[in-house]
Image: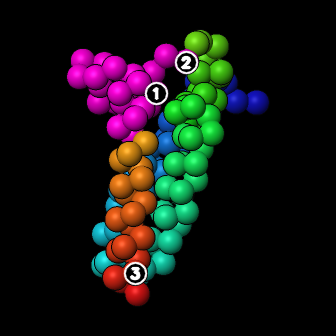
């Protein structure tokens, strides 16, 4: 069917597009239509709850490492920004949890304002 490298590339691409959509949706909501903000609110809520349930592990990253056959050591954003030089993995997980919660509140307030 697909080789592992192609599947890993597809997973990383989906992850990148998801993150990009989450970050750009307030601008799309303000410029185009507020309907772009509603899925972002639900997605952020899902990510926040999923982080709480799975002990700060992303489902997409877990899937990627299972396909690679490696032990999960660093997440997508942790690798992307080279956070190992700035903070520990636990500090970064806590930061991401609070950042997602912050985005959730801001997006909800923006949704109320755009209505």
The residue depicted at 34 percent of the width and 20 percent of the height is: 88
- Magenta stretch, overall SS: helix
Q: Residue 41: x, y in percent? A: 49, 64
Q: Earlier in the sequence, mark 3 or mark 2?
A: 2
Q: Residue 12: x, y in percent? A: 50, 36
Q: Are the residues flagged by discs 2 and 1 in contact, CB closer than 8 Å?
A: yes
Q: Residue 54: x, y in percent? A: 62, 34
Q: Nearer the viewer, residue 48 or 34?
A: 48
Residue 82 lies in the magenta stretch: yes
Which residue was labeled with disc 2?
A: 72
The residue depicted at 56 percent of the width and 41 percent of the height is: 52
Question: In what quadrant of the picture does the C terminus appear?
Answer: bottom left
Q: Say whether residue 29 is left or right of residue 75.
A: left
Range of magenta residues: 72-96
Classify 10 Å Cα crowding around label 1: few (below 14), some (14-19), many (20 and above): some
Q: Are the residues flagged by discs 1 and 3 in contact, CB closer than 8 Å?
A: no
Q: Nearer the viewer, mark 3 or mark 2?
A: 3
Give the SS element for disc 3.
Answer: helix
Give the SS element for disc 1.
Answer: loop
Question: In what quadrant of the picture does the N terminus appear?
Answer: top right
Q: CA distance from mark 3 to mark 2?
A: 39 Å
Which residue was labeled with disc 1?
A: 75
Q: Is residue 6 visible?
A: no
In this rendering, the answer to whether 31 lies above or below 99 is below
Q: Earlier in the sequence, mark 1 or mark 3?
A: 1
Which residue was labeled with disc 3?
A: 112
Q: Residue 92: x, y in percent? A: 36, 30
């Amino acid at each position: 069917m697909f080789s592992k490298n192609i599947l890993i590339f597809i997973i990383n691409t989906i992850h990148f597009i998801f993150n990009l959509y989450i970050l750009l949706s307030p601008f799309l909501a303000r410029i185009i239509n507020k309907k772009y903000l509603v899925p972002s609110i639900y997605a952020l809520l899902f990510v926040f709850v999923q982080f709480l349930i799975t002990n700060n592990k992303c489902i997409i990253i877990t899937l990627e490492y299972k396909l690679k056959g490696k032990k999960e050591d660093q997440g997508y954003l942790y690798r992307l920004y080279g956070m190992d030089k700035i903070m520990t993995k636990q500090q970064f997980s806590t930061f991401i949890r609070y950042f997602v919660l912050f985005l959730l509140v801001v997006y909800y307030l923006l949704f109320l304002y755009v209505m």
